[in-house]
Amino acid sequence: MKSEKTLRTQRETKNCFSSLRGTKQSIPNHLKFILNCFVPRNDRIDCFVPRNDRIDCFVPRNDRIDCFVPRNDGLFFCHSLMWWFIFVIIVLPIACKQPPPPSNNQVPFKIDTTLKIINANNEIIEFDVELATDDYKKERGLMYRYNLEENQGMFFVFDYMEIRSFWMKNTYISLDMIFIDESFFIVDIHENAFPLSEASILSKVPAKYVFEVKGGLCRKMNIRVGDKIMIDIKDIK
């Protein structure tokens, strides 16, 4: 047996729809079936009616009846799905967008010397090089740079061979890191280091020098482990 509360809610629902649709239009049989069979929870009734819009109506209490109707292209998305769509398409990309480099810390590229790489095809690839020989320059590296041309790179000079560790803090451009031994042969390459990442990037084998170039350049120029580096030694001492 239906409770008095349920029967009262159904009567008020029918009266609400009759007032909205006009006295000349009766409630369809399939809607009557839904209203007679539905037991509301928390005094809220959700039902579907054959209209092309959304009806919001209020009964003489604080109960709200939300009626979603089928359209030619399907039912309306529910509120939660629409808000999730807005979050994914609009809010999330903005939240994940990388902050622009601070304009007051821009560092221009300085050409100290030149460097050549002889790849496996015996092609000579020449670069303008900025040297990092003291502790300050090695610590700062290519931080706060807007751009790096394909023929530019920074050459880090260390005193001895060991496993080298780098990171991308405050570095706004993707980099390829070329690890070089004391005989000036490439012993390891880390490609496309992610901008602004503070994760450590370790060489797989000991290295004495590191040459940083624009991300993706090693693959583009066919630069591989075992290639020979040519640089004027007097410039790096």
Image (spheres, rainbow, N blue to C red):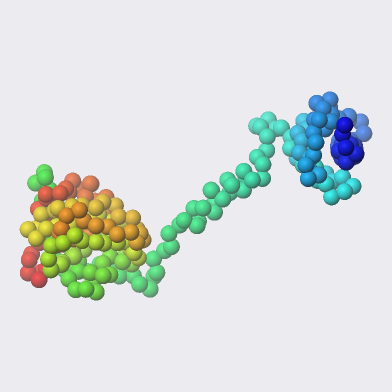
- Quadrant housing residue 59: top right
Q: Nearer the viewer, residue 153 or 12?
A: 12
Give the answer, above or below, for where 132 lies relative to 95: below
Residue at image point 19% right, 73% down: 134
Q: Position of residue 125 (x, y in %)?
A: 14, 53
Q: Is residue 228 left or right of residue 210?
A: left
State the quadrant of the N terminus.
top right
- Quadrant housing residue 69: top right
Asked whether the viewer can see residue 124, the reply is no
Q: Position of residue 104 (x, y in %)?
A: 38, 73
Q: Position of residue 191 (x, y in %)?
A: 26, 51
Asked whether the viewer can see residue 100, the reply is yes
Q: Is residue 36 left or right of residue 184?
A: right
Q: Nearer the viewer, residue 109 or 60?
A: 60
Q: Is residue 10 left or right of residue 181?
A: right
- Quadrant housing residue 5: top right
Residue at image point 14% right, 53% down: 187
Residue at image point 13% right, 68% down: 159
Residue at image point 30% right, 55% down: 193
Extreme-top residue of the structure: 29
